[in-house]
């Protein structure tokens, strides 16, 4: 089997018992399986939930807290306990682990995004196993969404993983909820995650976790749009992850749909960046950037809105719809001056036009689809 880069996401329900404590038997099973991947010469990145679930007992709570301050305090206790346990377990296999705590801001800020990518790739090159978790002690937004499924999808995309494995307490995707519907049929493989499937999915998580199957389907949809195939399911034993790679996993496989990998820069533009303005272009410019791989020139821009600087990201609209997002090579002031100069002086705008978005800094809607909308 060729060497692959594998992201494994383990949810709270797969790490803890009903009392909210770390289940040593479950944890040991995961450690054995992850170590087996490393033994098979694969690169492994672990995205692990469980900090809040592991810590709320230490606060005196009888169940998972519902307030933000309670969750953050529980995470402050549980995160150190969780990573300490992981590092001790992995050291028995001669594996050094490293902790990375991320927030959505770390991905939306370009420099921090680059730093996270550089850190992660350096760790992998040095043979270190990164353990990633949302920084639950400070991240209010992630606590609102309440799971690491999407984080695992975004991480798998930006490090160009060969496979995302989402381990959960249900062995795959069903046509209905198998816990309440005995006639629900399991899907061994799915070509595409549809909006109908997501809308019909159960949103209820376990007592110690917060994600349901809906969040996993949304994450799988994002990962596959970034070209990363996904497996959702579970298993037991040290070979369970190896069996997933062989196609024998106890769960559902979802195929990646992008033939060529989407580079890290374009992923940031499409998914993580904040749009600082809007450009409206004519039909000629729309055809050029959407169908001919051309850069966007000021000659094709009808009007602009918002205030932006060189290096910011803007949305680009055609006559009827959003076309995509791109990184601008000039400020809104410079662009408006170029447009005004053409209008006032009736110059040959085709020859005096400036490049606004280079094709290498452009991502069309059709490339990653709904992530842009």
Image (cartoon, grey):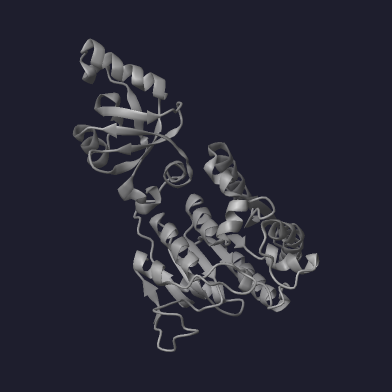
* Residue 321 visible to an observer of this rendering: yes
Where's residue 145, x and y in %? 55, 59
- Which residue lies at the image location 34% right of the left edge and 52% below the top edge? 369
Residue 194 appears in the rendering? no
- Residue 349, x across and y down, in percent: 23, 18
Q: Residue furthest bottom?
A: 182
Count all numbered tags in the image, as a single digit: 0
Seen in the picture, residue 108 relative to 241 is either above or below; the reply is above
x, y percent for residue 281: 26, 32
Q: Residue at x 63, y 69 (%)?
A: 12
Q: Residue at x 68, y 68 (%)?
A: 64
Left or right of 301 in this view: 195: right
Q: Is residue 74 left or right of residue 192?
A: right
Residue at the extreme top: 345
Q: Could you say where residue 233 lies in the image, as x and y percent from the top left?
A: 50, 75
Residue at x-position 54% and y-position 59%: 152
Relative vertical location of residue 6 with respect to residue 234 in this rendering, above or below: above
Q: Residue furthest front?
A: 67
Above-or-below relation of 269 to 198: above
Place residue 221 in its image quadrant.
bottom left
Nearest to the observer: residue 368 or residue 188: 368
Left or right, 31 with reference to 371: right
* Corner quadrant of residue 259: bottom left
């Amino acid at each position: 089997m060729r060497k692959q880069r594998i992201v494994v996401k383990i949810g709270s329900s797969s790490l803890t018992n009903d009392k909210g404590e770390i289940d040593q038997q479950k944890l040991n099973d995961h450690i054995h399986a992850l170590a087996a991947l490393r033994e098979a010469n694969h690169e492994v990145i672990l995205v692990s939930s469980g900090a809040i679930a592991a810590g709320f007992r230490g606060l005196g709570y009888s169940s998972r807290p519902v307030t933000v301050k309670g969750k953050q305090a529980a995470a402050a206790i549980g995160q150190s306990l969780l990573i300490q346990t992981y590092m001790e377990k992995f050291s028995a296999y001669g594996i050094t682990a490293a902790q990375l705590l991320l927030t959505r801001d770390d991905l939306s800020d370009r420099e921090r995004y680059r730093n996270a990518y550089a850190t992660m790739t350096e760790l992998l090159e040095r043979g270190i196993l990164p353990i990633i978790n949302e920084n639950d002690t400070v991240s209010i937004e992630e606590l609102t969404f309440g799971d690491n499924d999407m984080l695992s999808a975004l991480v798998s995309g930006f490090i160009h993983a060969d496979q995302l494995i989402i381990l959960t307490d249900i062995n795959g995707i069903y046509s209905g909820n198998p816990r309440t519907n005995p006639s629900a049929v399991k899907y061994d493989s799915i070509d595409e995650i549809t909006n109908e499937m997501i809308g019909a999915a159960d949103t209820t998580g376990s007592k110690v976790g917060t994600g349901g199957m809906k969040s996993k389907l949304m994450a799988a949809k994002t990962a596959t749009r970034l070209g990363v195939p996904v497996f959702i399911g579970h298993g037991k034993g040290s070979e369970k992850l190896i069996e997933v790679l062989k196609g024998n996993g106890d769960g559902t496989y979802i195929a990646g749909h992008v033939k060529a990998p989407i580079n890290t820069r374009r992923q940031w533009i499409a998914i993580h960046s904040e749009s600082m303005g809007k450009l409206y272009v004519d039909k000629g410019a729309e055809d050029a950037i959407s169908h001919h791989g051309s850069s966007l020139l000021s000659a094709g821009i009808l009007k602009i809105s918002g205030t932006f600087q060189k290096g910011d990201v803007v949305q680009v609209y055609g006559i009827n719809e959003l076309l995509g997002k791109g990184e601008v090579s000039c400020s809104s002031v410079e662009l408006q001056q170029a447009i005004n100069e053409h209008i006032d002086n009736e110059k040959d705008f085709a020859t005096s036009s400036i490049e606004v978005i280079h094709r290498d800094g452009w991502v069309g809607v059709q490339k990653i689809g709904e992530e842009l909308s």
